[in-house]
Amino acid sequence: MSESPSPPRFPATRCPDCSLLYGHEAYVCRECGSETFEEAPLDGNGTVYARTTIRVPGSGQQGKEPFEVAVVDVGGAESVRVTARIEDNPGVGPDDPVEFVERREGVFYFRAA
Amino acid sequence: MNDVCVVGMGSTEFGVRDERIKELGITAVARALRSCDIDREDVDALYLGNFVAGMLEGQETLAPLVADSVGLSGIPTMKTEGACASSGIAFRQAYQAIRTGVHDIVVVAGVERMTNAETPEFTRALGSAADHGTDGATGLTFPGFYGLVLDRYMYEYGATREQVAAVSVKNRRNGASNPRARFRSPVTVEDVVESRLVADPLRLYDCCPAADGGAAVVLASAEVAESFTSAPIPVLGSGHATGRSAAYRYDDLTTLEATTLAAEEAYDAAGLSPSDVDVVELHDCFSAAEIGDSEDLGFFEKGEGAAAVAEGRTAVDGELPINPSGGLLAKGHPVGATGIGQVYEVCLQLLGEHENQVDGAEVGLAHNLGGSGAVSTVTVLGGPSHV
Ligand SMILES: [Zn+2]
C-alpha cells in the first residue's frame, strides 16, 4: 500500500468572493451568500475524525451491510471535513490516515492509506 | 410578557398500540382537558407535533382533525415538525403565543404511530430526518450518527464501553416501574455490551425502541391558571435553536450546538443555572446521546458524563436524577410524542406524583432533540410554589 501512487485529487470547491472551501456541494456560500463556486481540487490524503460501521442499513442500502461511514478531514494545509464511505476496512478509526478514491453517485469514497 | 403555566396534562401509555394516529391524539388531548377544570370553549388554539404520520399512515391535517374530534371547534390549529423534536417545537410555539398575549389558553399535543409500519417504510420515514444529499447518501443512519459521536467521544475522553452501557442499565431500571414505558424489564451491563452491534460502537441495547403514543398538556397564562387547577406548573424558561445539518458540519461531534444554544436561552430566561435543576428528562435516543446531552446541558464537564452515570450520580437517588421515567430507552420513542411526553414526566415530578419520585424536586428540565442535532428545545419548569 505504501508504494501506491498518490491518491487522486479531491474535488473541493471554493467561494470566489470570500475563499471559503467546500467539500460537499454548496449552493449558497454560508459565509457571504455568493451563489457561484470555482473548482479547488485538494490533495486526496485525509484523516479519519470519527467512524462507524452500519450493520442495520436504511432504505436503499439493504443487503450492502456492513459498511463503514466516516467523517474525514481531507486536504493538506487547507482541508475540508466531509461525511464519506470507507471502502472495505472496518479497522480504521480516529486519526488514522485515509486517501480519496473517487466520487460515485454523489458519495465520496476513501480507503485506508 | 405574560407568565405561562402548565394547567393540565394527559398521556397514553407508550408502546405497541392498536389505535390509529388521530385516535392516539384524541385520547391524549381528552385526558389533558379532563385533568383540569377547563371549558372547551375557553381554549384558544391547538398545536400538535408529529413527524411521519403522512408517510406511515397517509394521514395528514392532524391538528384540525384532532381538534374537531375532541370538541375544540373553530379554533386555529397547526402541526409542527422537527423530527424527534416535533412536539417540543409545538410546546415552544404555544408558550410564545401565550407569553406575547396572542392567546390565553393553548392545548399542545404530540403524537406518533410507528410500530405498525413494515421495516422498509419505517426506515425510509425515519431516514427522512437526515440530509439526503450528504449524510443520507452515504447510508448513514441515526444509530450511525450516534455511532460516530460515540466513537469520537471514547477516543477523546477515554470513556469505556461499560460506562456508556450504564445509561441503558439505569434507564431500563427506571422504566421498569413506569406504567407508561414500553420496556418494563431491567438489563445488565453485560446484556448491553453483548447485544448485537447496530452501528459500531453502538449496540442494540444502546438504542431506544420505536413506540406508538400520544401526550398533551394545556398551557395557560399565569393570570388565569389558578382558575383551572390548584397546582399550576410555571414554565420558568424556554429555548429553541437550530444546530448542524449533517455529521461533517460539526467541528466537535461530541457537542450538539442546538442543545447548548437552546439550554442557554432557557437558563437565561429562567434566571437559573444547571446547578439549580433537581430533575431532568433529556433526549436519550441512544445511550451515547444521554452522555453528550448531560454535558451540553451543563450538568457535567466535557468528558465526565460517562463516568457520572457509571458512578450512579444520575440515578433516581443520585445528585442529579436524569430520566427517572426510563427515558426514550425504556419508555420508547414515539418520535412526535416524545417532547410532550418528557414535559409530562417532569410535571409529575414537580407535583410529587411520579412513580420514581425525586425527593424535593422543585425545578425540572425537559430537553428534546431532532435529527442529527438539527433542532432542539429546552424547557425549564418549576414546582407549584414557583407561581
Ligand atoms: Zn463566500
Image: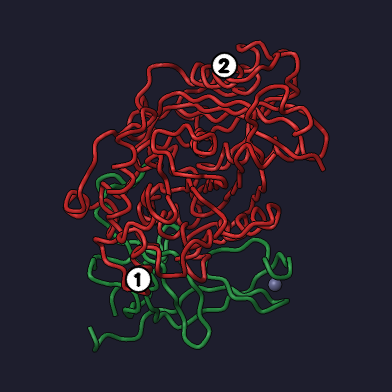
Chain colours: A green, B red
Location of the C terminus of chain B (image quadrant):
top right
Which chain is disc 2 placed on? Answer: B
Query: In the rendered view, would you say A18 is above or below B188?
Result: below
Q: Which residue is drawn at 51% across and 66% down?
A: B250
Is disc 1 placed on a helix, strand or loop? strand
The answer, for residue B340, to whether it is visible in the render is no
Direction from residue B10 to residue B385 in the image, left or right: right
Is disc 2 placed on a helix, strand or loop? helix
Image coords of residue B25 (percent x, y): 53, 21
Q: Which residue is drawn at 27% across and 85% down?
A: A4
Query: In the rendered view, would you say B134 is above or below B170?
Result: below
Instruction: Mark 2 vs mark 1: tell me if same chain.
Output: no
- The residue type indicated by label 2 comes to Ala
Is residue A75 or residue B15 the one in the foreground? B15
Residue where numbered disc 1 is placed: A110
Query: In the rendered view, would you say B184 is above or below A45?
Result: above
Image coords of residue A5 (percent x, y): 31, 86
Q: Is mark 2 within 8 Å of ligand 1?
A: no
Question: Tag on residue B149?
Answer: none
Residue where numbered disc 2 is placed: B30
